[in-house]
Every structure is written in C-alpha cells, then in structure tokens.
Image (cartoon, grey):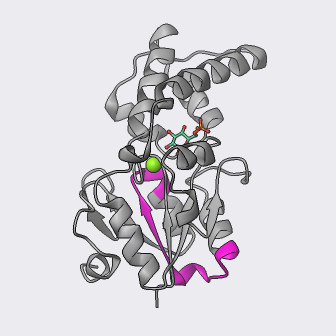
Amino acid sequence: MIKGCIFDLDGVICDTAQFHFIAWKELANGLGIPFDEAFNEKLKGVSRVDSLELILENGNLTLDTSRKEELLNLKNQRYLELVEGMSQSDILPGMAEFIFVLAAGGILKGVGSSSKNAKRILDKLRITKAFEVIVDGNMIKNSKPHPEVFLKCADLLGLEPSECVVIEDAQAGVEAAKRAGMIAIGVGTKENLPNADTWVTDFRHRTLDDILKEI
Ligand code: BG6
Ligand code: MG
C-alpha cells in the first residue's frame, strides 16, 4: 500500500532542468568541450561535483582542484542568475493540483533532490510547506543513482521504501528509486527512461491512483 510520494525537484515540480542545461552548456563550451541534449541526459539528477567530472571526462580534460572549485562556483552563480525571476507561476502545469489531491487523500509528500539549491527554489515557488520532508543535496553523501536521497526521505517520513513512490525525470533518479526498492514514475517517455515502472508527460488532470493503475 502506497503511503508516501517522493518528488524529484528539477524537471518534475518546475522546469529548472533547462537552467542547469544552459549553465553547464555555457561552461563546457567555454572549455572547448561539446555539450548537447543527449549528453545532458547523463547529468540530470547527478550532483554538481559529479556533473563537472563527467563533463571534463567527456572532454578529456584534467584540471586541478582549485580550478574545478572555481568552475563549480561559476556554474552555480550562472544557475542562480537564471532562476532569479522564478515564482509560483513556474510550478509545472497540473503539479500543484496533483499535490493538493495527494494531501487530501492523506498521502505523505517528500522532496528528494540532489540539488543544494532545492530549498531556495521551493521557497521561490512558494510550495515548501506542501511537503512534510525535504531532502536536498546538502543532506546526502552519495548523489543519484545512489538510493541515499530517497531512503533518507522515506525514513524521515516514517515509511518503508515499499510504501513510497518516486516521481523522477532523470535516468539516474529512476535508477536511485529502483535501488531504494520504490516504484518509479518517469516524467518522460519509455525511450528516455526505460527503467521506470510507468511514464507521465503531463500532470494535468492526473492523480496518483490513476497513474498507479497503469503499472
Ligand atoms: C539535480 C539536477 O536536481 O541537482 C542536476 O537534476 C544538478 O542537473 C543537481 O546538477 C545539483 O544541483 P545544484 O543546484 O546543487 O548545483
Ligand atoms: Mg530532475
């Protein structure tokens, strides 16, 4: 029986995935490393530090720790510039109603995000209080695809992993949910998220009950 729903943030509650993409692309291209949508799929859900490592590896570039620190700060500054104007109207279509119906049905709600900026973004969206538990990138040692973020969220919700469902737009996030022993609802298609249990592209007029019936 499902008692909790854990949401990824970037690309699920709001479209900040596009801002991570823009900031990483500018940084990679500035280093002379090609960066496209297909490569970006590998970075979704992955921590800032691990993302930089993947980009450098892709460009066969080795940098010292202080240069890497500098690049990580630059990427984050650019990302924060891009999200600066976000507000409640940036909650993705249907998502606020979806969360409202879960609450009315007594389902506990958590956020499980690799982002260290998750709380800042949730505050901008004015949706922080909709969640009983928020686990972000500052609270975990291992980033997705490791299951830590979701296991910690379930634990803080007081639930068993088998009582939780995860909503994820990233390959790494779907893998983390499955490794945690949770049902994974993919935001996207079977082609880009083959390991999810079911897929949703639009949350308008959808409920968790009707999505779970499709599994
Ligand atoms: C994830 C995003 O939610 O957070 C990744 O999908 C991002 O793209 C990661 O790299 C870390 O985010 P931040 O805000 O800590 O740099
Ligand atoms: Mg995401």
Given residues 186 and 204, the one toward you in this image is 204
Residue at image x 35%, y 68%?
98
Q: Position of residue 10 (x, y in %)?
A: 46, 46
Query: Residue 9: x percent and y percent?
Result: 49, 52
The residue sitting at 24% across, 58% down in the picture is 202
Q: Is residue 57 left or right of residue 34?
A: right
The mark tally for this picture is 0
Q: Examine the rendered structure and indicate whether residue 153 appears above or below residue 74.
A: below
Is 26 located above or below residue 123 in the figure? Answer: above
Residue at x 41% of width, y 34% of height: 40
* Residue 164, magenta (yes or no): yes
Residue 4 highlighted magenta (yes or no) = no
Q: Is residue 33 left or right of residue 47?
A: left
Q: Which residues are magenta?
A: 155-173
Closer to us: 46 or 13: 13
Give the x, y percent position of residue 151: 64, 69
The single residue placed furthest to the right in the displayed view is: 66
